[in-house]
Amino acid sequence: MDIRKLEDWYQKHHRKLSFRMTQNPYHIWVSEVMLQQTQVDTVLPYFERFIQKYPTIDELAIADEETLHKDVEGLGYYRRFKNMHLAAKYIKDHHQGIFPKTYEEVIALPGIGKYTAGAIMSIAYNKPYSALDGNVIRVLSRYLGNPHDMREEKNKKVLDQYNQQQIERSTPEVYTQAMMELGAILCRPKNPKCEECPLNTSCFAYQRNEMQSYPYLSRLKEKKNEFYITLIIHHNEGVYVRKRTETLLNGMYEYPQFEFESIASVVQFLEEKGITLVFHGESSTYQHIFTHKIWHMIVCHVSLVGKPDSDWIWITIKDLDNIPMSIAHRKISIFK
């Protein structure tokens, strides 16, 4: 690989993104966490607001968890931010609030895996550690003509080893960002701009016009369908919500919902707990698609006869905007 040509291309053509204009390891860490499974354009306003509100690791460490969840509402994959909060507390307690400087210390932090550790070490500290994300996998698969299934870890490992060899010959802070940027703006999944690519003269796929053949990705399992009855329980000038304790969307609020396909089953279940529902008008349907599952929700507007369930929390309509809630439920209309 012509490292110099790649790095020269990056210096001239990279996007001027706020989190790429710094070597502050805290800022780079926050950006990499936010960018997991999330598009750059979506992340940018969140990142800028986040750094303004939590300018140091110490301030992030002492943040209220519920407030933090609210600050990242809409980005999804909320477990990553729970881990980031835990890591900030650890850095405050064990590293005096200073982001650690060795790979071993960085990868030991909650929520940080090999890719994120490599990105931080190379971009912030200019150390030669491979950072292999989806963009880099696509670039290297095409460049090398690697035909193997990139959903399998053993095949990703081969590319990671090659990437490590290249970064050891490079300026790490530039190389890592150049590979990411190349995959994002030129070596795109569809309609790649190969004529503009600094590596096209030695790219296996481009020379054979086989760009769409790489990377090879075996078919994903079909998403699991889950069916819920979701209740908008009206009371006075507010509604009832509950705080999730499940792994998915842990710590986010939702309207009470039940994994039943029939409204009658929910009515019977609640009546056995001494809770009677009064229905208001027709039900409506909503759907929300996660990475591995789809929620199908029948939404019913109701009021109660008797006391609410012990884990339901009453909140005013006005204050609904101030609590962290997943997009799956945020998009449900609370009006009948």
Image: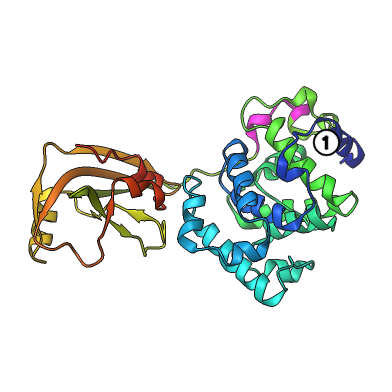
Most foreground residue, 137 or 83: 83
Which residue is labeled 1 in the image?
10
Q: Residue at x 75, y 35 (%)?
A: 16
Q: Residue furthest top?
A: 195
Q: Residue at x 78, y 27 (%)?
A: 207
Question: Which segment did they paint magenta?
Answer: 206-214
Residue 207 lies in the magenta stretch: yes
SS label for mark 1: helix
Direction from residue 254 to residue 145 in the image, left or right: right
Around disc 1, counting alpha carbons within 10 Å, would you say few (fewer than 14), some (14 to 19), or many (20 or more)?
A: many
- Which percent across, then down, holds residue 297? 26, 44
Is residue 294 visible in the rendered structure shown here?
A: no
- Which percent across, then down, holds residue 134? 64, 45
Q: Quarter holding the N terminus?
A: top right
- Which percent across, then down, holds residue 2? 89, 39
Direction from residue 253 to residue 193 in the image, left or right: right
304 over 74 or under it: above or below: below
Is residue 310 visible in the rendered structure shown here?
A: yes
Q: Amino acid at mark 1?
A: Tyr
Q: Quarter holding the C terminus?
A: top left
Residue 291 lies in the magenta stretch: no
Most foreground residue, 4 or 278: 278
Q: Residue at x 83, y 49 (%)?
A: 173
When asked about the image quadrant of residue 110, the answer is: bottom right
